[in-house]
Image (cartoon, grey):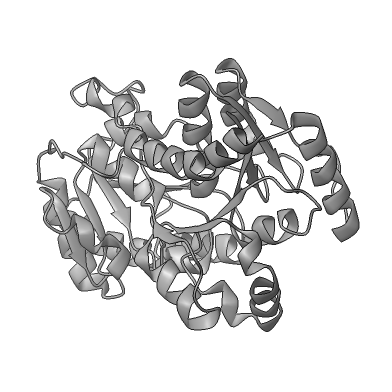
Amino acid sequence: MRILQLVYAPRLSGAEVLVKGLAIHHQRGGHEVCMTSLLPQQDDFADIRAELQAAGVTCLFPKIRYGRVGKLLYLYRVVRRFRPEFIVAHATLAALYVRLLPVHTPIVWVMHSGVNDFENGALRHAERLLSRRARAIIGVSQKNIDDYLREIGQHPALVVIPNGVDASQFADDVDAPAPDTDVPANQIVQLGRYIEGKSQLDTIRAFERVLQSEPDAHLLLCGVVEDIAYYEAVQALVSQLGLDSRVTVSGPRSDVAAILRSSRVFAMPSRFEAQSIGFLEALASGIPVVANRIPSFSFASGFAGVNLVDTTDPEAYGRALLAALRTPRANRHLAGYTLHDTADRYMTIARKFVRPLAVSA
């Protein structure tokens, strides 16, 4: 099968990491896979692109930033060139654009957003017009489906497929030594874009409390700088609290497995998430996890070494981080949340719509 995976922008973010995993998994399974986008590749995507190309996945990204008509024309040229039998569009804008094309290829679109995109009136109106152009609509969480039903209405094929993580990158390395001997012994790490919803400020305030009992602790913040003003606010708070020597505010990192191996605690104070890849990677690594008590994390509440708390309360959050520093790593069985599970469910949907077309031809 020829599968086209469409994203809005090739960048180091959860949806794109999932697409990389799906593309490589399906390519290795004997399918022909192409990943494309509406925006040019961002610099932080270079390592992921190298992985895709090494696995034989075709990457076709625009060289320049097109306007609305230019995006449509570029995408149409990609479809004509690659000739996919099945198209998977990830996120709202990508799904809107591809369904405007005059093609008969079955299209599935995947809702990744942790917020309700259809609160935007223009997006809501466009989706109502284009809804049936998608053979199936996938939500990575039940909340995505609930939002769709409330804002748009029924669709013949609405399905929840949780994101999956490649647990093999952690399975043999749980007890491996940290690759960087300069990593502090008591390091807490938070991975995520610098936006208000990821709540790095809450982690910094809680970490100040941690230092009162563990003065040698260290906090590492890594992520794509999406909101410059917020990123600067994070840096300012670190300086204001006098934590410059104990907190590292870093940009995006692609060596997630190594970071999780060398750290002692994973912090995830997000105000909202759909189904976070970073959270799943932390669970797979076995690292103790302290996360916000939001619905999308509730499935992990029974896992060893996972503590869901109100991370807007610096005292409660700080106590949880401190306890996690003293908690051993865990061996967690992520049945239903592995990349293999997710890729198989996507392929089941693809075969449902592609096979009848092949027979009729």
Residue 96 screen position, x and y as percent:
70, 62
Q: Quadrant of residue 323?
A: bottom left
Q: How many marks?
A: 0
**Residue at point 89% right, 57% down?**
69
**Residue at point 41% right, 74% down?**
146
Q: Answer with left or right where residue 154 lies relative to residue 307.
A: right
As drawn, 82 above or below 305 = above
**Residue at point 55% right, 41% down?**
356
**Residue at point 15% right, 40% down?**
332
Q: Between 180 and 294, which is closer to the camera in this rendering?
A: 294
Q: Quadrant location of the N terminus?
A: top right
Q: Is residue 270 visible?
A: yes
Q: Between 258 and 219, which is closer to the camera in this rendering?
A: 258
Q: Quadrant location of the C terminus?
A: top right
Residue 270 screen position, x and y as percent:
38, 64
| Residue most extreme to the front | 360
Residue 314 screen position, x and y as percent:
26, 71
Q: Between 248 and 333, which is closer to the camera in this rendering?
A: 333
Q: Answer with left or right where residue 28 lies relative to residue 135.
A: left
As drawn, 270 above or below 184 = below
Residue 313 screen position, x and y as percent:
26, 75
Q: Is residue 187 visible?
A: no
As drawn, 17 above or below 275 = above
Q: Answer with left or right where residue 234 lies relative to residue 126.
A: left
